[in-house]
Image (cartoon, rainbow, N blue to C red):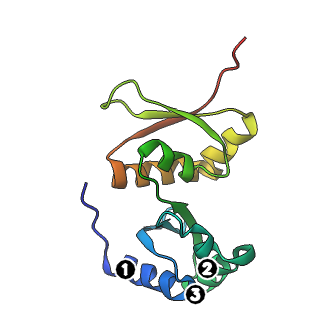
Amino acid sequence: MERTIGFKERRYIEELRILTKATALDCVIDDRFDRVIYVIRQGDMGLAIGKKGENIKRLQNVLGKRIEMVEFAETPDAFIANIFKPAEVTRVERSSPEVPVNVLVRQRSDLGIAIGKAGCNIEKARVLCRRFYNTEVGEVLLEKEEA
């Protein structure tokens, strides 16, 4: 799937590279939740965040928006797990390619984290999965305990 990156997104990606020396593969400006979401190259996450999150703080000051970062992964399932961090995704359920995937978490506390305030995290997952893997994300569900 072709991703088009506009002028403003390219500027934000360059700003990240200058401030952190990390490489962003993509940048989404999400006006609905007043944030910028970066997709960081695999292995560059530590560089992007910086010691005690100082790079994120500096970037937030420069851009004047909340910054969120997601580490890219080669497989859709691993990418989805990265999007929902720090919530622990136990598995991604797919019944067929045409049906949205459901994301399962083990603990009730992870459910709230995964969905996010006003659904911001699930919305981030939907946007990024469409852009990178042409996959629709359905719901975040609690994994049922096996008796």
Residue displayed at 51% across by 77% down: 22
The disc at residue 62 is 3
Q: Is residue 99 left or right of residue 44?
A: left
Q: Name the spot of residue 29 as percent of width and height, x first.
A: 45, 69
Q: Is residue 127 above or below residue 53?
A: above
Residue occupied by mark 2: 60
The number of numbered badges drawn on the structure is 3
Q: Earlier in the sequence, mark 1 or mark 3?
A: 1
Residue occupied by mark 1: 10
Task: Tell which of 31 and 11 is nearer to you.
Answer: 11
Q: Name the spot of residue 124 as percent of width and height, x first.
A: 50, 54
* Placement of the N terminus among the 4 image quadrants: bottom left
Name the element at disc 1: helix
Q: Amino acid at mark 3?
A: Val
Q: Amino acid at mark 2?
A: Gln
The answer to whether marks 2 and 1 mark residues whose Cβ atoms lie closer than 8 Å is: no
> From this viewpoint, which residue is outermost toward the top?
147
Q: Is residue 22 above or below residue 31?
A: below
Q: Name the spot of residue 68 as percent of width and height, x first.
A: 57, 66
The answer to whether marks 2 and 3 mark residues whose Cβ atoms lie closer than 8 Å is: yes
How far apart are the alpha carbons under marks 2 and 3? 6 Å
In front: label 1 or label 3 = 1
Q: Is residue 62 left or right of residue 110?
A: left
Residue displayed at 70% across by 80% down: 54
Q: Is residue 123 above or below residue 138?
A: below
Q: Residues within 10 Å of mark 2 (few under 14, many from 20)?
A: some
